[in-house]
Amino acid sequence: MAETAVGEVLAELAALEDPRAREVNQRHGDDHGVNLGKLRALAKRLKTQQELAVELWRTGDTAARLLALLICRPKAFGREELDAMLREARTPKVHDWLVNYVVKKGPHAEELRVAWLGDPDPVVASAGWALTSERVAKRPEGLDLAELLDVIEAEMKGAPDRLQWAMNACLAQIGIDHAGHRARALEIGERLEVLKDYPTPPGCTSPYAPVWIGEMVRRREA
């Protein structure tokens, strides 16, 4: 029954393929051509189906994996299963959705955060930093923020792109949410100048940490 459903869903995804969407997605390292709005609409119609989600993930197809992440039950995955999935998720969108839509909502987030943070694979480590940013913002108790800033200060400038981006986000989150560490976070950002020249569309906040921190603090105090 699941196999039939998989074939039907893959046919629907193939019908949604849009060369223009693929061109845009490929600029960001994602190898699929499905409009994400249409993908979400399909997920809404399918609703939660864990068995189908697992089968879609196993296809290895990026659009199918994104759909799987929208219709799965996050708490149904084991720790080792999630670790294996993350290491398979090499495209940015699949990686981001897996961390944000599944790992963060499951019972293994903290254990995986600690394991991934020191992983030698920079893409895996970036997931650890993304989970750390979540804790900095929502559950900072038990985190050594000064030590996190030490690591960011020492390693962010030379880190590969995706790891650098995740560390920078954590730096900004510390500066935004923790006034006692804000001055140091700003100083690190200003000295390292990571993402200082990143092209930012009008109306969007720059990912350059000093600007990001300043803007978010201003909004909260307004």
Image: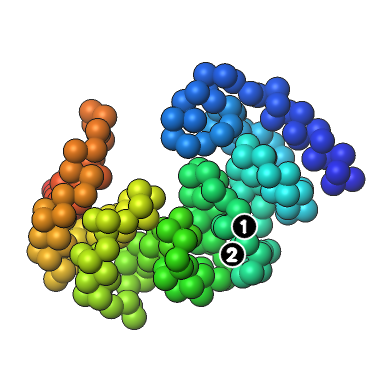
**Residue flagged by tag 2: what amino acid is it?**
Asp
Q: Colour scheme of this structure image?
A: rainbow
Between the residue at mark 1 and the residue at mark 2, the CA separation in whole angstroms equals 5 Å
Work out which quarter of the rendered image holds the N terminus and state it.
top right
Name which residue lies at 86% across and 44% down: 3
Name which residue lies at 21% across and 58% down: 176
Look at the numbered disc 2 and give the secondary structure of its residue: helix
Please give the label number shown on residue 83.
Answer: 2
Compare residues 121 and 172 and report the one nearer the observer. 121
Compare residues 69 and 83 and report the one nearer the observer. 83
65 sits left or right of 25 in the view: right
Vertical comparison of 2 with 110: above or below: above
**Number of labelled discs?**
2
**Residue flagged by tag 1: what amino acid is it?**
Met
Q: Which residue is mark 1?
A: 85
| Rendering coords of residue 191 (x, y %) | 11, 56
Name which residue lies at 23% across and 28% down: 202
| Rendering coords of residue 53 (x, y %) | 71, 49
Find out whether the residues at labels 1 and 2 contact each other: C-beta distance under 8 Å: yes
- Characterize the local packing of mark 1: few (<14), some (14-19) or many (20 or more) Cα atoms within 10 angstroms: some
Farthest residue to the right: give it.
Answer: 1
194 sits left or right of 114 in the view: left
Please give the label number shown on residue 101.
Answer: none
Farthest residue to the bottom: give it.
Answer: 142
Vertical comparison of 161 with 125: above or below: above
